[in-house]
Image (spheres, rainbow, N blue to C red):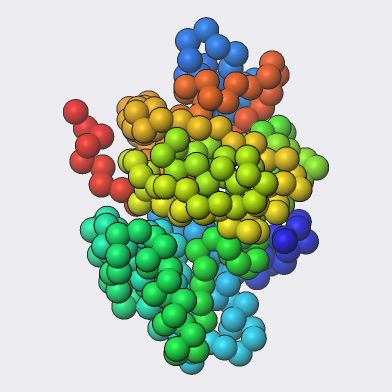
Amino acid sequence: MITLSDVRDAAARIEGRVRRTPVMEADPAAFVPEGAEAPARLWLKLELTQHTGSFKARGAFNRVLAAVEEGRLPGAGVVTASGGNAGLAVAYAASRAGARAEVYVPETAPAVKVAGLRALGATVVQVGVRYADAHEAATKRAAETGAVFCHPYDQPEMCAGQGVIALELMEQTGGEVDTVLLAVGGGGLMAGVAAALEGRATVVGAEPVTAPTLNAALRAGKPVDVEVSGVAKDSLGASRLGDIAHAVATRTGVRSVLVTDDAISAARRRLWEGHRLVVEHGTATAAAALRTGAYRPEPGERVAVLLCGANTDPSDLVR
């Protein structure tokens, strides 16, 4: 379980290590179906401009720097499992701490992410076709070597670090945000943001219908395994919501909305065509929730959409 206090501690720990990413105010009517109620105001939080191209640098730095404070780094090195983005973030944070990084990824991980990991000096090990396969191999390796294991979404330091985004967002918008829309995979981003905004704003998790980890957990009353497929599986590829994410979602009333692969792809193209923003399919899931009406704001509601990652091949955006 994490709270606002944990997020504030993370903010102090990672200050100066991560970028304060920009917020863009957008035309609300351009993000909803024709004739539908538009938000009173709409902001896009451009976390895609973060170090390594995704929000995950925040949690990675918080985890790595906490291990440094405990005296476990740089000697032990770090191990993580990732579909790509978490590995990039951990490798980057470890390199800045002078520590070795070993990253386990599925054999299906995008080539652009694998190349990025190696460019950061990480040892890359490709195992299986699912994130779960890479995770199992990574936890075994950490236990064998004594390395610091960095879970991509289900550790308190990881979740709290991601929540710093929400503190920034509220500062940048004068605290006027009523609702934050964000994509959910394993739920680390959602957990951190919901903990940071508890009692101040509502958090809505957008998910592909092909990877509904939060939706399934809320229905079952606990995290459960789901089948994962679809266009966003490289970044929203967790097959089970994290325990921390479920606890925070239940405590704070996080909602889940589902969108199709076609809607995700269309939202990704529109972000490029309308705003020249290149995002991953997983990132576009949050925008798709508004564009399709899967999430319908109330009159006067002020909405922020977190655009959380840009590690993608942009060649299919230009037609």
Q: Nearer the viewer, residue 230 or 118?
A: 230
Q: Residue at x 60, y 46 (%)?
A: 217
Looking at the image, residue 53 lies above or below residue 253: below
Identify the image quadrant of the N terminus.
bottom right
Q: Residue at x 33, y 41 (%)?
A: 231
Image position, residue 244 (x, y; %): 65, 59
- Residue 32 percent coordinates (x, y): 50, 19
Q: Which residue sits at x=40%, y=47%?
A: 228
Q: Is 27 situated above or below 164?
A: above
Question: Residue 162: horizontal and vertical position, in percent?
Answer: 59, 57
Relative height, residue 43 to residue 222 (above, below): above
Q: Position of residue 104 (x, y in %)?
A: 36, 71
Instruction: Report the quarter where the C terminus lies.
Output: top left
Asked if residue 244 shows in the view, the reply is: yes
Count of picture labels: 0
- The residue nearer to you, when weighing 254 against 193, is 254
Is 199 on the left or on the right of 302, as rendered?
right
Q: Is residue 204 left or right of residue 126?
A: right
**Residue found at x 30% / y 65%:** 128
Q: Is residue 96 visible?
A: no
- Quarter of the image for residue 254 reads top right
